[in-house]
Amino acid sequence: MWNFLKDVWHLFGRLFPFPTKPGLRRIGDPDRSSPVLVTCNYELTVRKVIQTLVRDGVDAWLLVAPTKGINVWCAAGGGHFTTDTVVSILKTSGIDNHVDHRRLILPQLSARGVNFWGVKEHTGWKPRFGPADIKDLAAYLRAGKSRTEREHRRVKFVVKDRFVMGTNLGFNTVLLLILPLLISSIWLTGLWWKTLPLLFVLSVASSVGVFWLPGKVGVQKGVSLGVLAAAIFVVLSQTFWQLPPWPLLGWTGWIVVLSAYVGYDMPSWSPLWRQDPKELVLGVKQTQIEIIQEKCINCHLCDIVCPSDVFRHDPEAKKYEVANLDACQACGACIENCPTEAIVSNFRGGTCACPTCAIIDGVGALKRKTQKREVPTVEPVPAAANCDTEACQCALEDREPGIELQTPENENGIRFP
């Protein structure tokens, strides 16, 4: 029952932190060669990771890092899931006493905050970034590859995920605007209770239909949805309610305004679009990113950590280049992990300009508190069934994750950490 109530809350309130205790979790019956994974301490994420590993018969050690109860993507972008966070949980969890290897699998979406080279240098562990979706983790582990399959590294914003994000967007938007609407209802009777359900419906529709609505992501798609919703409203009002001209005109315009606002805020709920005001309002591409070919050492990390398929490999030149600039959402993962600073851009990783984050960042700046480090624990999670030989091929190769060039120094004089 408690898990059901938590699931209901997560359906609407994922904006709010929901922490679980950080530390070491024993999944199934891991041994000294079992894989070691890291995730955030957002309760829903930890529960889903454990459920998926148990379901797929994967024995593993799971390090739950202290990220203030925030999910991987937002925690990495907000400075809560960082290199220091990973270093800290490795050193305080006692994982060294449970395994003989030093191979670590990080969530792919943590790359915007976690530096591959920094983790290796400060801990001696050999990190690599796993798939973007936990559902692909078992196949990734069984394959025993140093790099995740390309299709598993890309975020897939499917209808189910868009619906869940839409419910969260709607719930958050209602909370954000309920007070101004209540105050406005002093002069415009009933405005608040008529607007709030409309906001929620528009939020869900905006998220679910983002790939089908005309225009560019942001206000343009919001206006498109608003025009469609307003047209439906006009037909229904004239058929069933017979609204006078002025109220009809007022509500028609109000629907378009609300939808435009929702369209502006919606991209902040997915790691697919940059939260730049000019891009979201005017549809003008502001993102600029380039790889300096002379500095590129063909380490593949920019392509591995990118959730949006921005980069392309040139097999002849053995270099990477920007092939899909429109897909770049300025998360900064490539810049964070490039060992030679070969990537230049006009953005700062982790920046979000949506109304929600602007308010959260403002409140957070006023409430800086020192967080106590919790004592890590080891909690056993029983396996659903005994693993067969095929399902338990979790031993990982010793080669560096995602790195094909392993010479101490390459032709450009760049030394690896």
Image (cartoon, grey):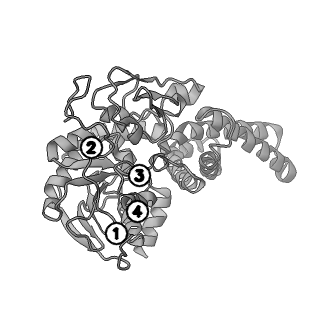
Q: Does the rendering let one see residue 172?
A: yes
Residue 138 image label? 4
Q: Amino acid at mark 3?
A: Pro
Q: Where does residue 126 sit, x and y in percent of width and height?
A: 23, 48
How far, Cα to Cα, is label 4 from label 1? 9 Å
Q: Which residue is mark 1?
A: 392
Answer with mark 1 or mark 2, whichever residue precedes in sequence. Answer: 2
In this image, 92 relative to 401: left or right? left
Q: Which of the two residues, 163 or 34, is positioned nearer the viewer here? A: 34
Q: Which residue is mark 2?
A: 82
Pick the residue in front: 85 or 322. Answer: 322
Instruction: Determine the CA span between mark 3 and mark 4.
Output: 10 Å
Q: Nearer the viewer, mark 4 or mark 1?
A: 1
For label 2, the crowd category at 10 Å Cα-Cα, with few meaning under 14, some 14 to 19 and many 20 or more, is many
Question: Is disc 1 placed on a helix, strand or loop?
Answer: loop
Image x and y of residue 184, in percent: 58, 41
Q: Residue furthest bottom?
A: 385
Of marks 4 and 1, which one's residue comes earlier in the chain? 4
Vertical order, 153 against 140 (above or below) = above
